[in-house]
Amino acid sequence: MSATDRACDLRRQIAQQITAQGAVTVAEFMRLALAARHLGYYASRDPLGRQGDFITAPEISQMFGEMIGLWCVDTWHRLGRPNPFRLIELGPGRGTLMADALRAARLAPDFLAALDLHLVEISEPLIAAQGQALGAHHPRWHETLDTIPAGPFMLIANEFFDALPVHQFEMTTAGWRERGVTLREGPAWDQDVAFSWTLLPPGPQLALLRPAHQPAKPGDLAEVSPASIAVCDQIARRCRADGGAALMIDYGPAESGLGDSLQALRRHRYHDPLQDVGAADLTAHVDFAALMDTSRLAGCACFGPVTQGAFLRALGIEMRAARLSRGQLPQGQKDDVASEVASALHRLIDPAEMGTLFKVSALAMPQLSDLAGF
Ligand SMILES: C[S@@+](CC[C@H](N)C(=O)[O-])C[C@H]1O[C@@H](n2cnc3c(N)ncnc32)[C@H](O)[C@@H]1O
């Protein structure tokens, strides 16, 4: 089945659910659009790169994964060099970040010998790409964290939490109401489906709102991601029980607040989130303050958020860029490589590019008081 047919089938599946049960929450709509078995956006394609819909930091330059590899080696030492330990990545994309990280970690053979690699992924095409990139490290795949064996661990999540569903709430003149998605007209099974926004009747979901969402005026929007909080809570409890640390990199503000950050990206352009469902990526900003509160409540040490630019500079990305630019190449090619490296460095750390919008946070077992980069 082609990707276009799958997206069409997905829209019909969502329409059927709405016809049978009424409007769905934005979170349920996002979950189906991205992760419905076999038909969801991530389940059915490799969306990364110039030919795809968006590009991520590890796909911009090897330097990103290399810095994270060095962070892992340093953190492993701070954790007391557990052997064995689980190295876990959530949503590893094409496996590029982990492949670059493990290549950089060759300077620490004990680290490589102790690690047991686990990847959490729901996309079959991306699992195939990860197998190609990381086969030599014998990874094991999981749909969720639940099936990863207990034990000390280190976890990496780059642009994973932004793909988890968010509930949206709108302040009306009658108070907060949850936003939902319904069908624009009655179901038309013989043609494509059109969706529209609606407001759901008041219900217990309103309890998800946080103090940071006050005060609000009519028209204001608030977002909450219980799915992200549940994953973060699971990581934090594990960190406390088994020892470990987790690094989360994503885009979003440092402080919780109001705003509509739900966005759709297709072929590197912004789209209406209700259009091209199943064929466009859907994301929302990550609420780092909510994740850090969750980790703190579970008894973990919390670090950040700091900006991606500050984090990568603190780990020495500028030195790495200078080294890569000097490379062992003939003079003509050296100039090309130097300008490629400079442009990648700019994209990763400049405040006008990914340097400020993207943030980095970490959580760790409570005995750790320091982590590199923070
Ligand atoms: C935006 S991509 C980021 C990929 C990679 N981390 C990178 O930086 O290139 C999101 C990744 O998370 C995976 N993913 C999305 N939702 C997921 C879920 N609910 N469970 C597990 N993986 C998921 C996607 O298939 C993809 O690998």
Image (cartoon, grey):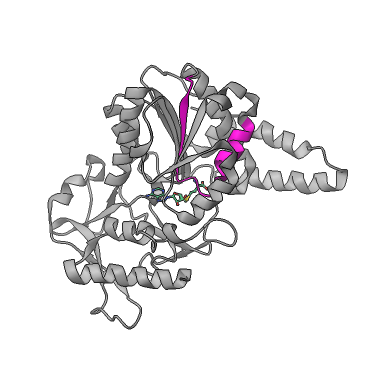
**Image position of 43 (left or right of 322):** left
Question: Does residue 352 appear in the picture of this structure?
Answer: no
Specify the quadrant of the image occupied by residue 273.
bottom left
Residue 315 shows in this picture:
yes
Picture coordinates of residue 247, whole percent (x, y): 45, 34
Residue 34, magenta (yes or no): no
Q: Which residues are magenta?
A: 82-104
Q: Looking at the image, which residue is at 16% across and 46% down?
A: 207
Residue at image x 39%, y 73%? Answer: 8
Q: Nearer the viewer, residue 32 or 267?
A: 32
Q: Identify the residue at the far right of this view.
A: 331
| Residue in the picture at 82% in, 37% down | 328
| Residue depicted at 42% across the width and 58% down the height | 43
Task: Indicate yes or no whether the magenta region holds residue 88.
Answer: yes
From the viewer's side, name the closer residue of 194 and 124. 124
- x and y percent of residue 57 in the render? 56, 46
**19 relative to 210, above or below:** below
- Residue 269 in percent (x, y) is at 50, 64
How many numbered circles are shown? 0
Judged left or right of residue 198, residue 365 is: right
75 w.r.t. 229: above or below: above
Residue 20, compared with residue 354, is above or below; it is below
Q: Nearer the viewer, residue 46 or 200?
A: 46
- From this viewpoint, which residue is outermost toward the bottom? 190
Query: x and y percent of residue 331 in the render?
Result: 87, 43
- Position of 93 with respect to 108 (left or right) is left
